[in-house]
Amino acid sequence: MTERESPTVGTSGRISAKRPRQALNCKPCRNSKLKCDRFRPCSSCILRGHAAFCYQNEGPSSAHDNKSKYVRSSDTDAYLLTIALRPHRVVNSKFEFKRIQQSLASLQAHVLRLEASWAPTSDHSWIRDGTQEQKSSSPDASNSLSPGTTGRLTHRGFYTGPTTSISYLESISSLSDEGDGDMNNVYEAILPTKIPLDYEADIDLISQLPTLSIVDSLVDYYFEFCTWILSIVHQPSFLEAWAEYKSGKSANRVVLATVCAIMTETLYDLPESHPILDSLQESRERLRIRYYDIMRSALHRYQLETNAYSMEFVELLLIRSQVLMRSNIHNEEIWRVSREFVAVGTAMGLHREPGTAMPIDVAERRRWAWWHIVGIERWQAFTFGRPPSIASHHFDTRYPSVCDPSVDSTGRLFVPNFALFRLAHLLGDIIDDMLSLRPVPYSNVLAHDKNLQEWLDSLPPELNLDDDALTHSLCSPVTAVCRFGAQSVHIRSIFLHIRFAMHEPYVIAAHQSPDMTQNWDIALDAAESLISLASQGRPEFLENASPAVVGYMSFGPIHIFSAAMFFTRLLSDKPDMSESARLRQNIHKAISTLERLRHLPMSKKAWVILKELGPLYSEEYGRECTESRLQTKTKVLSKVKNLDFPYYDS
């Protein structure tokens, strides 16, 4: 050791240790080995969203008191002034004002929560919270433990449950967190990540789009007429992002993919007489394929460049699933996409109630997205006959409830959406029993049917329409009235489809047990009503209906086909039953409706199958002997099995 390196010796003869150097850089910059400008918070932490951890639990440095005095001030103008005076720093005033707006929104959410504790019940009291329904079904809820409630979003923005090893560290760190919500201190971590891109990288995709005026017209039509059932895309956020994309401020590929998905969906609902179609040079079928391919390419490029999740990304996956359901071509792709948006939604913690930890507009957007995930995924599980991804007791996100007065001054605009979310909640338990490999007691079926009937009784008068009122609504020139008519047909068709399918396995046993005859009557009445209700989409009726209604009637063929297949199965098994004439009449009514709707891919497939099954529900089949029936049945079914079925790839 040289003399320069030797330690000093004190008067007591002890060797004095070196004085430790004071850490001047903040801890996040030291850990990441980044350059720190030593402001409080520093520029690096602000850019990476770690401002809350910059110089955390560290006293002020005297060397930087003069630099940070404005930052520690509660005065907003002084804070913005300090940021503006920092050397070599570009001020993003929009970002700073956004931070202030989020703080005000948090304060607003806190005030609304206090007011809700004494506010009287509104006329929307029939909209019950999903978590309350779950708690009421548990008799020992007060003495039970809910381990899943200990899950939380990590500081990286991903949700982690109580079974993971990192949950222990997160629970320890949460003890020192301020605030009363699990998501309070990770809100900045789940904000969308903006990736700098160049428009030239996607010029091959952009060049295939129509003129900007046509794109904007299709987008406007989508938000006005195509969101009556599924309001997937958050309109204010998307329009703001789309404006930035058009102005050249952002080349976000999620925005490009979303606008292509919106155009594809709009081309399904656009009436033949609409002037937009005259300005397009190609057929709508070819354009739908092109725009969908552009969407898929943009989405693929986005996923290659980052694995970040955002609300925009979730909404893109949801609308992609909606487009696939309309096309009925890539059926297994529908199932894969549904698995993907469930995985992304749970990774973002959308299945957990945000409460007041987030700004009220952000929390509502997350609720809307999650209940669209639940509704779409469970309907697809029901249609495919496959188990759903998530059970009702694995999430506690409440239904959306806040209506923007500037969008809906009446507070009734989204009542049908809330009714559909409640039906999706009931469908989860119904599917569990319908797909169960264990015996399901008949009492479960009666309990589910009671819940469905209560749901129907609680429908608002705008949706529970009789035949005359429904016809008047669908033909009304007033968009608001026409909207409720289309929603009534769509929502009640789903209800009737679920109800008869739930009773279908027990119908055969109804002739063997007097206690189960109720199943027979409920299933037959529901299937018959379903064919009549869904037949509102036949062309001769739609000639007098509003053009906006036509697109929503395209969902009818799958309901008609399912009910007709139910009747065909009954007649093929018991052709001599007393209700055979009634069932045969409904089958012919379904075939007649599907024949008039053969321009739809799903209708054409269904019509071909029912025509091929004709010998099994004919009157001659009932007069044949048992051996002859078996031969006819074997011959017909062997041929039908090779045909294309709706929602199944051949």
Image (spheres, helix red, strand yellow):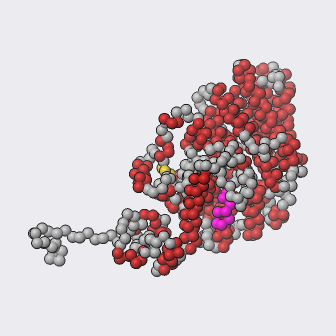
Q: Is residue 7 left or right of residue 532?
A: left
In this orientation, does residue 262 appear? no
Count of numbered labels shown in the rendering: 0
Query: In which quarter of the view is residue 291 placed?
Result: bottom right
What is the x, y in percent for residue 276?
81, 64
Residue visible at 37% across and 63% down? 57
- Tell me where the magenta segment starts and ends, as one range: 232-242
State the image coordinates of residue 350 (x, y, percent, origin top left): 57, 51
Residue 537, percent across and down? 83, 46
Q: Nearer the viewer, residue 469 or 3?
A: 469
**What's the residue at 46%, 75% (across, down)?**
70
Q: Residue 137 in the image: x percent, y percent?
A: 59, 35
Determine the residue positioned at 49% across, 43% down: 148
Left or right, 307 with reference to 204: left
The N terminus, quarter of image: bottom left
Q: Is residue 363 left or right of residue 279?
A: left
Q: Is residue 141 above or below residue 10?
A: above
